[in-house]
Every structure is written in C-alpha cells, then in structure tokens.
Image (spheres, rainbow, N blue to C red):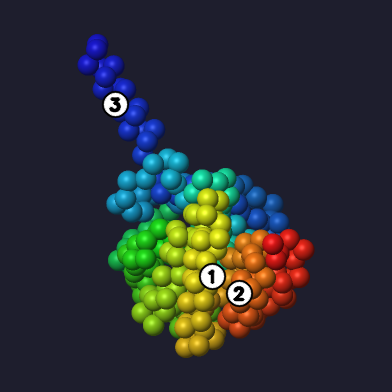
Amino acid sequence: MQKLAIYLLLMTSVFNTTAQELFCNVQINSSQVQTSDRKVFSTMQTAVYEFINNTKWTDTKIQNEERIECSILINISKKISNDEFEGSIQIQSTRPIYNTSYKSTLFNYLDNNFRFKYLEYQSLEFSEVTHMSNLTSVLAFYVNIILGLDFASFSEDGAYQYFNMAQKIVNNAQNVRETGWKAFESDKNRYWLVHDLMDRRYADYHTAMYRYHRLGMDQLSEEPDDARYEITEALESLKSIYRQNASAFILKLFFDAKSDEIVKIYSEAFPNEQARIVKTLVEIDPAHSSKYQAITKSEEGGR
C-alpha cells in the first residue's frame, strides 16, 4: 500500500510539472456562413483546440508554467461544400517578460489564404513527411513558427529546428491546389515567411530577437537604461536587413508585433535616445512612422 502511494505521488508530480508546449486559445467565427447546422463549427473548434494543445511538438521538457501562450482565430467566410470551407486565420503569440506580469507580443499575423476540408468528428492528423490535409498543415506550420519565434527570443540559435520544420511543411505542400504555399502566388505568404526566417542573409534578425527580448525586455524592470540600450542596438541592427531588402517579410512581421510596444518603451527615454530611435524606426518601418513620431512628442519623455 505504501509503495502504491509513493508511485501515485510520483506520477502526480510528473503530471503536474510537465506539459505540452502550447497553451492556445482557439476560436472559430462562422457568423458569415448561412447554414442551419452550426454544430459542425463547435466540433471543429474542439478538434483544432485539441490538435494544437494536446500534440507534443518538440522533444523539449516544458513545465506547465512555461507553456507558450497563443491564440488562433479562424474566420470562416464561406462554406463551399459539406466538408470544405474558406476564410482566414489570425495567429498571435506572446512571451512573458522576466520579473513582471507583462507579456510581449512575438507574432501577430493574419493569413487570408485559408481553404480547408473538415468532416465533423474526423481526427486531425499531421505528418512531417507528407501533406495530409490543408487544415493540419497550416496549423502545424504556424505552431512551428510560434515555437521558433519563442525560442529565438531566448537563444540566438534556438529557432532554426522549428523554422526548418515549417519549411518542410511548405515543401510538402508544393503540389496542393490550396494557395499560400508557393513562391509565385504572393511575396507575402507562408512560403516567404519561412524563407525569410531561414535566409542567412537575414541572420541579424535572430540576433535582434535575442538581444531585444533577453538582454533588453527581460532586464527592463531592473536596469531600464541599460536594457533600453540593448533594445536600441537590436533595432539598429535591423537596418542591415532593410538595406538589403526594404520589403523583407520579416521586418513587417517584427514591427506589426512590436510597434506599439516600442512607442511605450521610448516614451520614458532621454531626448537624445528618442531622436536617435525615431530616425531609425521611420527609416526601416515607414508603415508605422506616425506612431514613432509621437515618441518625441511624448510629455513623459525627456526626463
């Protein structure tokens, strides 16, 4: 009896301290679809939730409190047939910042090329070596992007195995009819997303991700001036990518996730810091230039 109690205690301990990698909120929005049978969308939501959260995506041992928080919103705009749907998928992931309750956005992306088949109550299956369905391939692709970006924020070389898997998923989908996988279809789709993340010409992106988060954001609460210096240097290093390719997809992804956060960080900076960073940001991220101009106008700045 005593041995049984010890065994149960050990099993409970393992269960409580290890977990899958993701804690993902999943929503299916089908309000645009005219149909009398709406139950399929609730079962679809459950199936997607379980596929993402219950699959073991890596060999890394993850503590429950270390799970990556993310969200997936699938907006279904059209029901093409009984088992085929069309719409978009919005993906967001965050990273906790050391010694604070703040969560920093790593990825915030809307993919409008999402057409897939789903038969109610079917099991969702994914293979690393072949394209089994567009639904699971798209989900697995973005899971690996989420994992890669998270690991990139903790280690300069920690992301490549996940981006490599995302690239394999793209390669497996080159002969499918659904869009979003091929280079010629668009200059900003799944193909180019992982292409840019794997492109060694853009290695400064990975250094910037690590420096911005691990040396900057994680130190901001304790050493704000030193941390902000690291963040500034990380952002300055992205100039090399912009000057090679002003339309590089990864720059758009980075600043779509970070622009609001950057404005808040530099609202507390010295005037010379503000002037320097605004000049850099307006150059390499002109899409958000009006946000950045507000930094130098901040009443809180210029301590």
Residue 56: x %, y % from top left: 36, 49
> In the image, what residue type sits under mark 1?
Thr
The answer to whether mark 1 and mark 2 are in CB contact below 8 A is yes
Residue 59: x %, y % from top left: 29, 52
Badge 2 is on which residue? 277
Pick whichever, 279 or 239, lies toward us: 279
Q: Quadrant of residue 275?
A: bottom right
Q: Quadrant of residue 141?
A: bottom left
First in residue order: circle 3 vs circle 2:
3
Residue 43 appears in the rendering? no
First in residue order: circle 3 vs circle 1:
3
Pick whichever, 136 or 26, lies toward us: 26
> In the image, what residue type sits under mark 3?
Leu
Could you say whether the residue bearing mark 3 is in a helix, strand or loop? helix
The residue drawn where x is 29% and y is 26% is 10
Badge 3 is on which residue? 10
Tell me the distance, in whole angstroms, between the alpha carbons under discs 1 and 2: 7 Å
